[in-house]
Image: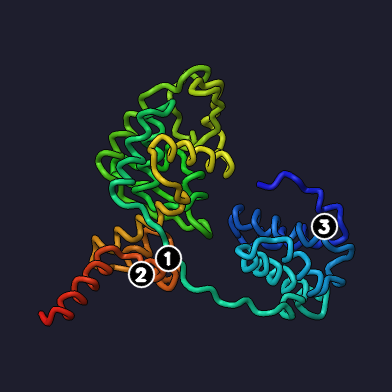
Amino acid sequence: MMRDKSYQRTRLGKDVVAYLAWKRAGNFSERTLDQYERDLRLVCFAVGCGVKGVTHPDLMLVLENLPPGSWGRARAAWANFFKWAVREGMRPDNPVDRLPPLRRKPDPVYEIWDQDELDLLAAGTRSMESPLRERLRVLTMIESGARAAEMLDLQLRHFDLARKAIKVTGKGRKERLIPISQELSQIVDEYLLTEYPPPCGRLPALTDYLWYPVWLRGTQVLGLRPERRLGYGGFWRWWKRVEEAAGVDHKKPHMTRHTFATDVLDATDGDIYAVKELLGHTSTRTTEIYLHSSRTRGRAAIDALGAYRRGEQ
C-alpha cells in the first residue's frame, strides 16, 4: 500500500480521502483502492484547488507526465472520482467527459513461452540460493496462470494438498480454485517440512507468504521475512534472477499467465469458458484476447492453407 500520504495536505486531498472512504464502504479490494489513490494523488499535486475547481486542462497536464499506457487506467479512476463528486453536489460536471476520447488500440500479440523455455525456467532454479523455494515459486506461476498481485498474496495455507489445488483470490476478492499437478503438490509438501535457512531457522507456517523479502549478499542469505508479503519491486528483481539462472530471453512475468491461457485453450479444443473460470475473468470478452495466441489453431490454419494451395482440398 502507498506509504506517502502527503497528498492529503493539499486542498483536493481531503476530497480524495472522503471518496476513498466511500469506495471502501462498497467492499472494494485494497489493491483497487491503492491504485485509485495513486492515480488521484497525481491530480492533488498538480492543482491548487478543491474538487470544484479542477478543469479538464488540469487533467490534460497530468496526462502529459504519464506514459500513454497508463492513460486509460488513470482516466477511469478520475472519472469515477468526479462522478462521485457530482452525485454529492460538490461540482456540476465531470471534467473527464471533456477530455478527448482515447483511440482504441489494436489487440496485442502476446509473446508466450514455449515448452522448452518453461522447462529452462524450472531447471534454472537449481542454481539459485534456495532451489526448493524457487522451483515452488516458478511452477506455481506456470501452473496457476495467476496475476502478479494474486501470486504475491499467496500464503502456504492457500495450497490444498488433499484436493491438489491452489485457492487464488482475484479482483473483487473473487476466489477460484486452480488444480495443480502431482509434482507441484509434492514440492509443496517437501517445502512445508524443510526449515528456512539461518537466521530464520524454523519450519514454514501456513500463514507464511510464498513470495517474501530475502536479503542477499551474492548467494549468501543475510535475512528473510516469510511472514511479510514481497513488494512489486522485489518481485521484478526476483524474476530477473530467475531468467538469468534459466538463460532465457526476457519476457514479462505476466507472460506465464498468457501462456497458461493459451495452453488450456489448445488442450481443451478452444473451451473459452474453462479458461475464463481458471483466469478469474468476469466475462468471456476478456478471455477472447487469448484466442489469437493459440498455437494449435494457428498451425492447423497454416496446414489447411498449404493443403488448399496444393489442390488437396
- Residue 53 image offset from top left, x and y in percent: 87, 71
- Residue 109 is labelled as 1
Residue drawn at x 51%, y 56% is 173
Please tell me which of labels 3 and 2 falls first in the chain.
3
Quadrant of the image containing the C terminus: bottom left
- Looking at the image, is 198 positioned above or below residue 232? above
Q: Residues within 10 Å of mark 2 (few under 14, many from 20)?
A: some
Residue topped by disc 3: 45
How far apart marks 2 and 1 lie (CA) works out to 8 Å
User: SS of the residue at dot 3?
Assistant: helix
Q: Are marks 2 and 1 in contact (CB under 8 Å)?
A: yes
Mark 3 or mark 1: whose residue is earlier in sequence:
3
**308 to 74, vertically: above or below:** below
| Real-space Cα separation, disc 3 to disc 2, in angstroms | 42 Å
Local crowd at mark 1 within 10 Å, few (<14), some, or many (≥20)?
Answer: few
Dot 1: what SS?
A: loop
Q: Amino acid at mark 1?
A: Val
Residue 191 in sight in this render: no
Tell me residue 21's x, y (percent). 72, 58
Three-letter code, disc 2: His
